[in-house]
Image (cartoon, rainbow, N blue to C red):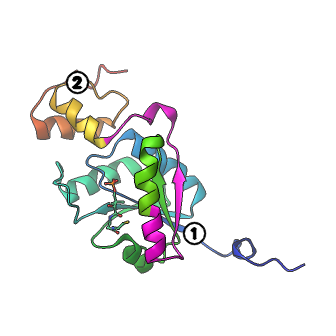
Amino acid sequence: MTCVGIGAHRGTLRVIAIYPGTFDPPTNGHLDLIQRGAKIFDQLVVAILGNSEKTPLFTLEERREMLVECTGQWPNVRVESFQGLLVDYARSLGAQAVLRGIRAVSDYEYELQMAWMNRKLDPSLETVFMMPAGAYSYLSSRLVREIASLGGTLASMVPASVESRLRARLGVAGPPISGRK
Ligand code: PNS
C-alpha cells in the first residue's frame, strides 16, 4: 500500500511554525509555550505584531530584545516582528503552522474565531493549540503589567530581566528580585 498525505513526506518536510503575539511583555507562560513548540516544530518563529490596535507599554524593539534574551537556549527558535495579516507573513516565511496557547476555556472562543478566520484566509495554514503548564493558566501580560504598576511581586511570572525592565518603565519598586524564590 502506498502512503499518501503529510506522513509520507515527513522525512523531508521541515515544519516551520509561527508563534504570533503582542508579548507586552513576554511572560513565563509565553516561554513555556515556546519551549513546548520548539520540541515539536523544526523551526519556531516568535513573531511580534508591529501594527497592533493596542498601545503597548514596550516598543517593538524592546519586546524583541526581551524575547531574544529569553529564548537563546533554543537553537531552532528565532524572534521576528511582522505587520499586516498573519497569513501573508506566514506565506512569506513558508510557514505551515501557527502556534497559539490556550490557558483556559475563556481563551477558546477568541482563539477559535481567529483560527477559523485564518483558515478562511489561507486554508493551507494550520493552527496548532498547546496548553502551557497549569501554573501559568491564569497568567497574562495584562495582569503582569497591572501587578507591576501596583508594586506587587512578579516571582515566577516573568524572567528577572523582564521584571527589571517593567519596574524601570513603570517607576514602581517591587520586592527585591534577588530575594525571590
Ligand atoms: O498576543 P495577542 O494580542 O493575543 O496576539 C494577537 C495576534 C497578534 C495573534 C493577532 O492579533 C494577529 O494575528 N494579528 C495580525 C493581523 C491579522 O492577521 N488579523 C486577522 C487574524 S484573524
The residue range painted magenta reads 115-140
Disc 1 residue type?
A: Val
Q: Which residue is mark 1?
A: 15
Asked if the magenta segment contains residue 126, the reply would be yes
Q: Quadrant of the N terminus?
A: bottom right
Disc 2 residue type?
A: Gly
Q: Is 121 in front, or is 70?
A: 121
Q: Residue at x 43, y 68 (%)?
A: 117
- Compared to 22, does 1 lie above or below? below
- Compared to 147, does 56 lie above or below? below
> Residue 131 in the image: x percent, y percent?
52, 44
> SS at mark 1?
loop
> SS at mark 2?
loop
Q: Which residue is mark 2?
A: 152
> Residue 76 in the image: x percent, y percent?
50, 60
User: Which dot marks residue 46?
Assistant: none
Q: Is residue 137 left or right of residue 3?
A: left
Asked if the magenta segment contains residue 38, the reply would be no
Q: Is 107 in front, or is 24?
A: 107
